[in-house]
């Protein structure tokens, strides 16, 4: 079994939040050679535009983008079926004006879910996605969910000339919450950072 790290850095940007668009942007910087990462929905980031009437400085209520919302960012990981993937998330839990890490801070809570069932439609995948509790920053899963019970799967086919390894897709849904915006928060660009580290175990070699 070999483990290969894949480092992806995602940048968050909250645009001016007073009567202007609210959006958290990120960009993947790197993908590996055996695992293909694609942002298949909302490549510009978490879009809080539809939540704009709810974002009020000093309001004690959080404002969230939920798993079922159109604004949720969807990441697709395409990998051989016999891989096990470990995905680790780390993030700044506050957004700061211009990313300076000082001044008024807006609390941000990241949430994520995954689906590795092989279902075909986005609606099915979201309905059966596994939401990871907020305390967990790491999840390890097979590319295709294994059924509980029944006989074990046959061993993987060793690589040989002309053999093409079957592949599958795992979907991650990234969403989150702007926790109560402080009363004295000024309009501006609020920045933070998410780091996603994807490693895989090759169960053939």
Image (tube, grey):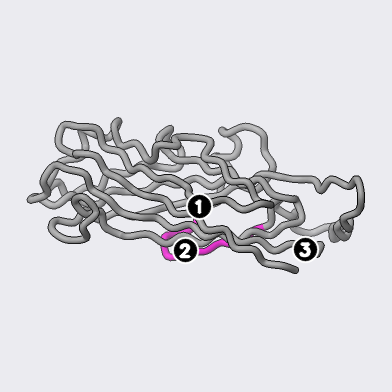
Residue placed under numbered mark 2 in the picture: 137
Q: Nearer the viewer, mark 2 or mark 3?
A: 3
**Front residue of 146 and 162:** 162
The residue at the point 13 percent across, 58 percent down is: 103
Residue placed under numbered mark 1 in the picture: 131
The residue at the point 69 percent across, 42 percent down is: 118
Query: Going from the N terminus, do you reach mark 1 or mark 2 first?
Result: 1
The residue positioned farthest toward the left in the image shown: 184
Q: Nearer the viewer, mark 1 or mark 3?
A: 3
- Asked if the residues shown at circle 1 and circle 2 are in contact, with their CB atoms under 8 angstroms apart, the answer is no
Asked where in the image residue 25 lies, by quadrant, the reply is top left
Label 2 to label 3, Cα distance in Å? 24 Å
Label 1 to label 2, Cα distance in Å? 12 Å
Query: Going from the N terminus, do you reach mark 2 or mark 3 first?
Result: 2
Which of the image's four quarters has the C terminus?
A: bottom right
**Front residue of 67 and 155:** 155
Q: How many marks?
A: 3
**What is the span of residues highlighted in magenta in the rendered image?**
131-141
Residue placed under numbered mark 3 in the picture: 203
């Amino acid at each position: 079994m070999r483990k290969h790290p894949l480092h992806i850095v995602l940048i968050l940007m909250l645009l001016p939040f007073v009567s202007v668009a609210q959006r958290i942007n990120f960009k993947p910087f790197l993908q590996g050679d055996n695992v293909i990462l694609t942002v298949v929905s909302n490549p510009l980031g978490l879009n809080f535009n539809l939540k704009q009437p709810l974002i009020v400085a000093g309001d004690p209520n959080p404002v969230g983008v939920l798993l079922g919302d159109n604004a949720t960012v969807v990441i697709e990981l395409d990998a051989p079926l016999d891989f096990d993937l470990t995905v680790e998330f780390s993030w700044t839990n506050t957004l700061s004006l211009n990313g300076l890490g000082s001044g008024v801070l807006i609390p941000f809570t990241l949430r994520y879910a995954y689906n590795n069932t092989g279902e075909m439609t986005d609606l099915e995948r979201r309905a059966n996605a596994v939401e990871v509790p907020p305390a967990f920053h790491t999840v390890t899963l097979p590319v295709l969910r294994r059924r509980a019970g029944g006989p074990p799967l046959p061993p993987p086919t060793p690589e040989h000339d002309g053999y093409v390894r079957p592949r599958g897709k795992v979907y991650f849904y990234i969403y989150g919450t702007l926790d109560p915006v402080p009363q004295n928060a000024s309009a501006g660009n609020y920045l933070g950072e998410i780091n996603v580290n994807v490693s895989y175990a090759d169960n053939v070699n």
